[in-house]
Structure formats: structure tokens, C-alpha cells
Amino acid sequence: MLILTTAAGLSALLAQSWVGAPWWLIIALCGAAGIGMPATWWLRQQAARWDQQDHAIESTIRSALDDSTLPLVGETNLELFGVHRSLLPVPYLVRDAHMTVVDTLDSGRPVLLLGHPMAGKTRLGAEVVRRHFAERPLVVPAPPRGLAQLFSAGASPVRTVIWLDDLDRYLHQEHFRVEWLDRAVRARNVVVATMRTGPYENHLPTRGARQPQWELLERFQTVWLHADDTERARLAAVSGDPRVRAGIRRYGVAEYHGGGVVAIERWHAGESRHPLAAALVRVAADWRRAGLDAASEPVLRALAPYYLPSPDRQVTTETVREALEWAGELIDETVALLEPTPAGWRAFDVVVDHVAAQGRPIPDATWDAVLAAAGHRLVAVCHAAAVVHHRPDIAERAWRQAVERHGDAALFEAGLLRERLEPGVDTAWWSDPPSIPPLPWH
């Protein structure tokens, strides 16, 4: 603009003062001055518009690297997409709906992934675009007004991936218009959105009345993620970890890994706000760590004082039931800290592993209660006490009771367990405790 303004000004000055110049040069200088001034004004307006667009990118797009550039999808981490973190690095297990999403996006239609919380919607969508559209820039508008500010500034993306996690955050009529989605599709953008079942149902037409944003939602091709036992079995079969395999079969792959993080955070929050409920969760977790499964309500009530910060706190049937109601409440409609079973309350797998990783010891009172309730599981208790918790005294008590009560069955079960142990693990407590005969085949 400075060069153009200077040239136009000099042209006007020369045309006015250059005496004796050829007529065609005077006309050319006048033309340069006449065109230069409007061109300068136009460039000034265009520069302001470019600045406005750059500001829109910087202030409304979460994925913006600076005021004018965007990262490529293939170089973006999962956190920017909104994927729930997991306790362990989890490789993506290809879902049944994966290719349906790919084919729909290849056809040019926007996709809306629907399902209950932690159904794996965000991870599925993120993996699809990372694998199949890795070379495109990523646009993640900041909710709720990011789309409105972006499109109203004229900064319409072209051939990008527009990512709208939890679409309901953008759905106010002033924040997301049908024409903006149509414009994005015409510009060959890949548009992927996710939404939970509840908010989606709130926008469905009812009794002939159409919700304001239903026209917009109809533009998307919906892909539902439902609980499917066949898919769970397939995904569990390709998992190498037996514990993870069992978790996938029970809850689902996304629910197990994503729900675990939220469950642990809820438990830690409960240690401050709901100490009795958190104590009951620890009792149930230690019950499983000791080799059993579900703990009955009387057991939880009897052992809770040993896990409370104030042992003299009164524990009654009413307070325990209130605490169990909190601990048994579904988190995001998916998992709970404690699950009711016919035999009692069972601690969520991930919470059990988390308690074990913290190295919290199992109180002697809990071991005593476990031995009293173990029944035919005494050998499993013996194994857990010796190998996992390094309590040979408890292991010997459990082993003695197992041999006395179950005889050959206990010896046979112990032999099977010992064969599964890694080399170098001390198993003397199985074969050589005082007055206990050695196993017949060793």
C-alpha cells in the first residue's frame, strides 16, 4: 500500500507539473494516479478484512498454531480432539462403524457420531480423520461462538477437517446456521461431530413440533454406537491383557478405559466429601485384592471403620446404605465404583488396580474377614496373600484351612496355580508349611 500510494502521488504530481511532456505520458500518469488512489483504498479495506480473518482464526479456533496457520490432522494429538485420557496407553481397536464413517465422509456428507457417554464416539471419529485425512488442516472451533465468529468474519475453511466434539455446545441458533454447514460442505471440508444420546433426543421433533436446530441436525449422516456383544467379543479377543479382555467383555472397550479415569477421580473426590462411601469402595477393592469377588453389605459395614480417617465415626445401616447409593451411582451412565451382584457389592476393576498400584496394605481385620468368608476360595486367598501381598502368615493360615476343609481338592487347585507361576516365585508355603504334607506329585 505504501508503494502504491507513493506511485499514485508521484504520478499525479508529475502529470500536474511536468511541462512539455508527451501527451500520452501525461495521460498515463493521470491514469496511474486515478487508478492508484482507489486501488490503495481497496487494499486498505482488504488488509483490514485479512486482519479480521486472522484474528478470527486466532481467537475462535482452538487448533490454531498462531494467527494464520493450522496444524495438520495427522500431527495433532488425541487430547485436542477431546478424547478422554486413559490410565494406560491404549492402542485403537477398530470399531465396526469405522468404515461406515469413512465411506460417508468420502461421499462428502458431514457425519454425526451418536451414543451414550464414553461409547467411544470421539476416539472413533478422531482415528478416522487421523488415518484417512491426515494431510488436511484441522479446525476446532471454540464453543459456543467459535463457528459464528469464524464464518461471520468470512474466514470460511476450505479442504480442512472441521471437528465439532459435543455438537450440542454449538447448537444455539445464533451460533450455528444451516447455511454455514452447507458452505463448509461445498468448500470440500470434512465435517465430523459427536453428540450424546440425551441432548440429541432433546432436539428431536415431538408431536409435530420441530425444534429450531433440527433442520441443521438433519444435514448430518448419523452413525450410532450401540452396545454390541459381538463387537465386544471381537475387540476382547485381540487384546493381549487378560484383565483388559475381561473389562472389554463386561463394559465395552471405550467404557472400560475412559470410565476408569472418571471413576478414580470420583473416588478421590469422595474421600473428602463422602468418606464413608470411599471407605466402602476400599473395603470392596481389598476384598477382591485378597482373592475373593463381591463383599456383602454386613461385611462392608463391619470393616468400614478400619478404613475411615476417624475410626470412632459411627457406622449405621442407614449411613452405609446412603454411602452405597453414592458409590453405586452410574458415572456418565456407564460404570460405577461399586456394582451390585447377587453375592454383594463388587468394586470396579480399574479402581481395584489403582488401589493396588498405590501400595495401600490390606488391614489385618480384612484378612480375618476374608479367611472367615472364603469357603472354597481359600487357595486363591492363600495365593494372593503370599505372591501378591507378601503375607506368609496369612498364606499359611489360608493353606491350613484349605487342606483341612477341602483336602485333595485344595492340593489339586494349588498344583494348578503353582504351574502358572513365573519361574523363581517361592512356593514353599504351598508344600512345606509346618505339619502340612507335601503335594503328592512334587
Image (tube, rainbow, N blue to C red):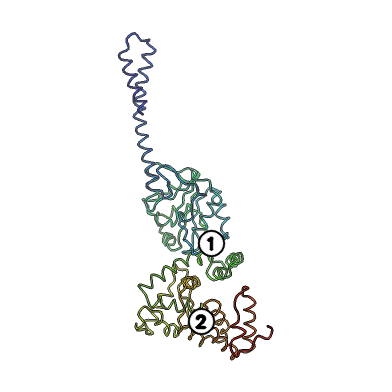
Please give the label number shown on residue 34.
Answer: none
Q: Which residue is mark 1?
A: 90
Quadrant location of the N terminus in the rendered image: top left
**Of all residues shown, which one is farthest toward the right?**
441
Q: Is residue 300 visible?
A: yes
What residue is drawn where x is 56% and y is 50%? Answer: 132
> In the visual, does 141 lie left or right of 72?
left
88 or 107, nearer to the observer: 88
Please give the label number shown on residue 342.
Answer: 2
Q: Is residue 179 visible?
A: no
User: x and y percent of residue 45 in the render?
Assistant: 35, 34
In primary-sequence order, the first of circles 1 and 2 is 1
User: Looking at the rendering, which quadrant does residue 434 occupy?
Assistant: bottom right
Q: Secondary structure at mark 2?
A: loop
249 or 430, nearer to the observer: 430
What residue is drawn where x is 40% and y is 59%? Answer: 209
> In the visual, does 81 lie left or right of 412?
left
User: x and y percent of residue 125 in the render?
Assistant: 51, 55
> What is the three-letter code of the residue carrying label 1?
Val
What residue is drawn where x is 59% and y is 78%? Answer: 426
Label 1 to label 2: alpha-carbon separation:
32 Å
> What is the three-letter code of the residue carrying label 2?
Pro
The image shows residue 31, relative to residue 155, as above or below, that is: above
Q: Secondary structure at mark 1?
A: loop
> In the visual, does 420 lie left or right of 312?
right
The image shows residue 105, relative to residue 248, as above or below, that is: above
The image shows residue 117, relative to residue 317, as above or below, that is: above
User: x and y percent of residue 122 in the render?
Assistant: 49, 58
